[in-house]
Image (cartoon, rainbow, N blue to C red):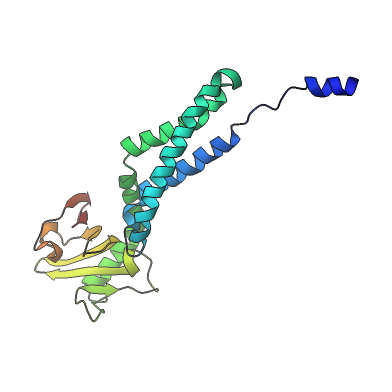
Amino acid sequence: MAEMTTLTTASPARPSVRAALLAALVVSAVTLGIATFELSMADWPSGFVLLVLVPLTALTFIGCGLWSMTLLLRIQRHGVKFAAPFLIYALTLAALVYAPLQEIALQRNFAWHRTSRERIVARVEAGELKPNVTYNENLIALGDGEANVSAGGNDIVVDRAEKGTYVLFLTSRGLKHYFSGFLHVPAGADPKDFFEFDDKPPSRLVRYDKDWYFVAN
């Protein structure tokens, strides 16, 4: 009889927020990662993956965010810990809206690869590296022997002009001849004179340092 009384009076297990908190951390991390590196993932064939991945991630983020709002109803009974998932989604959304995630990624890319890229530019200017792709007279395939400094197969684009040689290191290489990347221009030259912009000026042109620009067509 005493045993039955103990069983019936035992308090029920308190609900846990761990699953919702873990889901919030994972979904938010994936969302921020895609938002940060979306530009560098625009290459073929990963660009097609983004067509599926971006909408799926967005729907997952929205759905989990709405789920976290329902957990707010439990705060009064089970504690403020049930607000944690919603807070994570709110902070992630603020970062997506206000933080320059892609700019931060580009700055890191520029800083990490600058030494290797400048060494390659010097070799191009010295004539040590020359176009070696049969179907494109402006393309140099660096191959596996060089550091991976250019997206889309580690190829760089060169343009020999009157003032010197332009060298483009790609950060994305998409369909329909879309590209973006860091362009090294000859001293005193105009980045808009790069041959890829003969028909249309660059859609993006940001100076990163002396003779270095981020460009996109």
Which residue is drawn at the image coordinates 38% and 54% (left, top)? 52
Would you place residue 88 above or below residue 205 in this image?
above
Quarter of the image for residue 128 reads: bottom left
In x, y percent, where is residue 97?
32, 36
Q: Quadrant of the C terminus?
A: bottom left
Q: Is residue 188 visible?
A: no
Which residue is drawn at the image coordinates 38% and 35% (left, top)? 93
209 vs 150, left or right, is left
126 vs 34, left or right, is left
Q: Is residue 69 visible?
A: yes
210 vs 105, left or right, is left
Quarter of the image for residue 198 reads: bottom left
- The residue sitting at the right extreme is 1
Q: Quadrant of the N terminus?
A: top right
In this rendered view, identify the residue nearer to me: 44 or 130. 44
In x, y percent, where is residue 180?
24, 58
In x, y percent, where is residue 92?
41, 36
184 vs 143, left or right, is left
Quarter of the image for residue 100 reads: top left
Would you place residue 139 above or below residue 204 in this image?
below
